Image: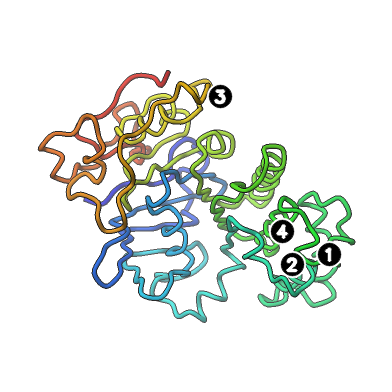
């Protein structure tokens, strides 16, 4: 049974909308190893969905598969469908995908210095995002580049447009990357740990511009992070990933206050986030035993069973997806895959 991780809950206005992103049965493999297994993911216009899990859980790999950016030796199967484009994106040529990336779907990467060209001025890089896709003439793109740099909060956008990436701070560079991603008004924006290297003040500014940018465009947002407090701030729904599978999904408030999968409960207990959203003392935090296994070495059945305090022999069988009983029709995406679900409010 495919893991149901549809982003349909919460907003009645969106319930009848066609999804912007619809991923079904996504698998990513090397020649000998399966890295992602049976991942389903749907996001509708205007939704902000978080994807969380420890490093090595498959979060970034999911995003790269969706955008057709997998490295050599990796293959993806299943279905990836984007609003406005017919057919399965996984079956498109690289040229076909290149015409969509940066236009209808765009990505903000974790490290802006590797995402930006060090030999090009910042304004030229923002303008190039538009001229490559034919959304503006060269002169229009140059003017709009300055406007975009202003929109993302750079204090002197005309000066910033003439600067090279190394002349800007880390937070300013990340704003430039966001400006490039938003340049063509994408219907889907994917952010992969975009604030990891930033201090708290700059992080808040970058998060605000991302949320404002997608809201003003009524775009869909997939936000990948290990920071649960960021998800609580930015996202409406959350998907929990471990071992290349979605193990729990639902509205952020519900999952964070009443986790059902044992892995989700462990993540929340080990974080410094309380049910009320406040920070806790790190010295008092418990830990999840063990470490994330290397790719391809997760146990059969429940991928978390070798670290789970509730595991029994039954967990050698893959648990089915269980919808949460407190949601009605149309919200079956809220659920979990665990034989021995956790219960009670996070404290």
The 10 Å Cα crowd at callout 3, few under 14, some 14 to 19, many 20 or more, is few
Foreground: disc 2 or disc 1: 1
In depth, the one of 80 and 32 nearer the eye is 32
Q: What is the x, y in percent for residue 38? A: 28, 56
Residue 123: image tag: none
Quadrant of residue 62 within the rendered picture: bottom left
Q: Is residue 214 above or below residue 24?
A: above
Quadrant of residue 295 within the rendered picture: bottom left
Q: Is residue 143 above or below residue 320?
A: below
Give me the C-alpha separation between circle 4 and circle 3.
Answer: 31 Å
The 10 Å Cα crowd at callout 2, few under 14, some 14 to 19, many 20 or more, is many
Q: What is the x, y in percent for residue 221? A: 55, 50
Callout 2 touching callout 1 (CB < 8 Å)? yes
The residue beneath circle 2 is 126
Give me the C-alpha separation between circle 4 and circle 2.
Answer: 7 Å
Q: Secondary structure at mark 2?
A: helix
Q: Please state if 89 lies on the left or on the right of 184 as rendered.
A: left
The residue beneath circle 3 is 279
The 10 Å Cα crowd at callout 4, few under 14, some 14 to 19, many 20 or more, is many
Give me the C-alpha separation between circle 1 and circle 3.
Answer: 38 Å
The residue beneath circle 1 is 161
Callout 1 touching callout 4 (CB < 8 Å)? no
Task: Give the mark, 2 or 1, whose residue is nearer the N terminus.
Answer: 2
The residue beneath circle 4 is 179
Quadrant of residue 54 within the rendered picture: top left
Q: Secondary structure at mark 3?
A: loop
Task: Give the mark, 1 or 3, whose residue is nearer the N terminus.
Answer: 1
Foreground: disc 1 or disc 3: 3
Q: Please state if 53 lies on the left or on the right of 190 as rendered.
A: left
Foreground: disc 3 or disc 2: 3
Q: What is the x, y in percent for residue 286? A: 39, 26
């Amino acid at each position: 049974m495919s893991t149901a991780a549809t982003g349909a809950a919460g907003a009645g206005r969106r319930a009848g909308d066609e999804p912007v992103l619809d991923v079904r049965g996504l698998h990513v493999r090397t020649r000998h190893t399966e890295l992602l297994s049976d991942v389903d993911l749907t996001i509708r216009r205007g939704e902000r969905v978080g994807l969380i899990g420890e490093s090595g859980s498959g979060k970034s790999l999911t995003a790269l598969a969706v955008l057709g950016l997998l490295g050599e030796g990796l293959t993806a199967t299943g279905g990836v469908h984007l609003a406005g484009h017919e057919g399965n994106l996984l079956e498109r040529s690289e040229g076909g995908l290149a015409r969509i990336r940066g236009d209808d779907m765009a990505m903000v990467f974790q490290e802006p210095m590797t995402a930006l060209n060090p030999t090009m001025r910042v304004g030229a890089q923002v303008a190039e995002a538009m001229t490559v896709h034919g959304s503006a003439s060269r002169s229009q793109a140059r003017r709009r580049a300055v406007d975009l740099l202003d929109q993302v909060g750079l204090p002197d956008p005309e000066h910033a447009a003439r600067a090279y990436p190394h002349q800007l701070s880390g937070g300013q560079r990340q704003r430039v990357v966001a400006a490039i991603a938003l340049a063509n008004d994408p219907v889907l924006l994917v952010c992969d740990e975009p604030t990891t290297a930033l201090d708290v003040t700059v992080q808040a500014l970058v998060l605000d511009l991302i949320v404002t940018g997608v809201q003003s465009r009524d775009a869909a947002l997939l936000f990948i992070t290990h920071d649960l407090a960021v998800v609580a701030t930015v996202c409406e729904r959350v998907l929990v990933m471990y071992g290349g599978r979605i193990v729990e999904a639902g509205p952020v408030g519900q999952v964070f206050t009443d986790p059902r999968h044992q892995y989700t409960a462990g993540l929340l207990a080990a974080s410094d986030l309380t049910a009320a959203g406040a920070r806790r003392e790190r010295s008092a935090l418990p830990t999840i035993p063990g470490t994330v296994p290397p790719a391809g070495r997760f146990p059969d059945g429940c991928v978390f069973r070798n670290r789970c305090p509730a595991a029994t022999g039954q967990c050698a069988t893959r648990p089915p997806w269980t919808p949460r009983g407190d949601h009605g029709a149309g919200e079956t995406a809220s659920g979990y895959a665990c034989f021995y679900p956790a219960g009670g409010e996070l404290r």
